[in-house]
Amino acid sequence: MKLRKLDRERTWRVWSSGGESGMSNYYVFRINYDDRFKLIRRELVNHHLLRQGWGTYGMALDSSYDTFKAGWQSEWEKDLPDEMMRARYNNLSIMLKIEPGDYIIVPKVSVEEDYVCRSFVIAKCKKKYYFDVLAEAEDFGHIIEVEDVFSCSYDKNLHAQNIKSKFIAYQSPLNHVRSESFKESVDELVRLHAEQPDEFAKNSTDLISMIGRATASARNQYLEQIKSVLQKIDNHKFEDIIGELFIKNGYTLTDNNWYDGEGGDVDLVFECFNRNTLMYNIYEICDVKMPHIYVQAKKKTGKDIGDIVGVDQLVKMEERIPEKNAILMVINLTDEFSDEAKEKADENGIILINGLTFASLLVRYGIEVDIR
């Protein structure tokens, strides 16, 4: 029965993409979520153009890296480390691989709502990459033209929830998706949209959505207060709170303040599986080295311009970690991680958790923080 289900899903993917030789690729495409969000969203919704930044005059990706770098230096007159420039060029160059018929998923965007929200857009590539600077921004010249654009709430069904849950693995501006589960969920949503487009076109006016919008401001204010309190406590207390969050959810703290003497640093180490789970018992019975969660904790405020340090410390420690399937995590109370930190974390499979996300986890799992 399972084989038949997989065969049906595979058959749908082949049929919807035009045959075996034209099977689609899948990409997560993150746009700007700052003050340029409405401009970039408008280009997508009104003109079916997906645009990426780092794209001012002279920075076309189908030229050489040296041309790309020269374009940056000419327009913005700002020197950046060559490693960072090359990493961004390499990531953006994924756009050159996107072919007509490939699926592109854009997190936090809705066709109906003009603000960052709990929805994602699914679109199909219509035209390969080309370069045309958006004049009013003098940037965002990297373009993929798309078609069959529709949006889906994170909570619409299990397929939407599955896609949303996997976004954490795709934090770079451009991400080639290899997860079969992710692809199958996209295929199913495309099929459902083809059969019942009106179900996806409905505005988010249900009671839960209205309550959510009405309470979002108060909730964010509360989370900001929690974050502010956490930033003022000492490092040991902060690590204790992280430990409490994991221990309350069944994880066992096995080590802390682990250094290698060469710049590598791990603040907390937890066993990867709750002791009451099947996987924990399998590792115990088979006498196999159990994977662990390695956490680097930082209490930075605002935007931490040195946030790459926490990522580097974990990367340096990775060589000394005995198991190959460890989970590496940076918890930093910063407002937002830099592109440099995100790119290096993505390259090394490191999870990044910022201040508001950590505060929301404390609330969700009942870890009290006195904000008085």
Image (cartoon, rainbow, N blue to C red):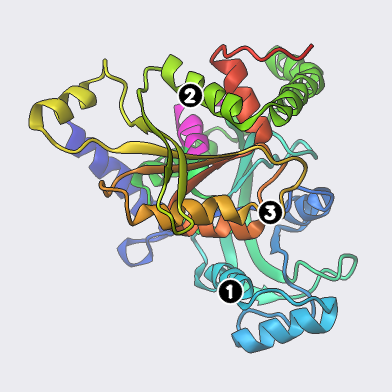
Is residue 313 covered in magenta?
no
Q: Is residue 191 visible?
A: no
Q: Give the foreground label among 2 and 1.
A: 2
Which residue occupies the foreground of this view, 22 or 220? 220
**Residue type beneath disc 1:** Glu
* Residues shaded magenta: 155-165
Q: Tag 3's secondary structure?
A: loop
Which residue occupies the foreground of this view, 180 or 302? 302
Question: Which comes before the other along the chain, label 2 or label 1?
Answer: 1
Question: Which comes before the other along the chain, label 3 or label 1?
Answer: 3
Image coordinates for residue 30, horizontal then vertical, percent = 63, 52
Res 225 quadrant in image: top right
Asked if residue 137 is positioned above or below residue 261 in the image, the reply reads below
- In the picture of the structure, the residue carrying the numbered disc 3 is 31
- Left or right? Give the position of 259 relative to 326: right
Question: Which comes before the other along the chain, label 3 or label 2?
Answer: 3
Image coordinates for residue 239, horizontal then vertical, percent = 54, 29
Res 5 quadrant in image: top left
- In the picture of the structure, the residue carrying the numbered disc 2 is 243
Q: Tag 2's secondary structure?
A: helix
Image coordinates for residue 279, horizontal then vertical, percent = 22, 27
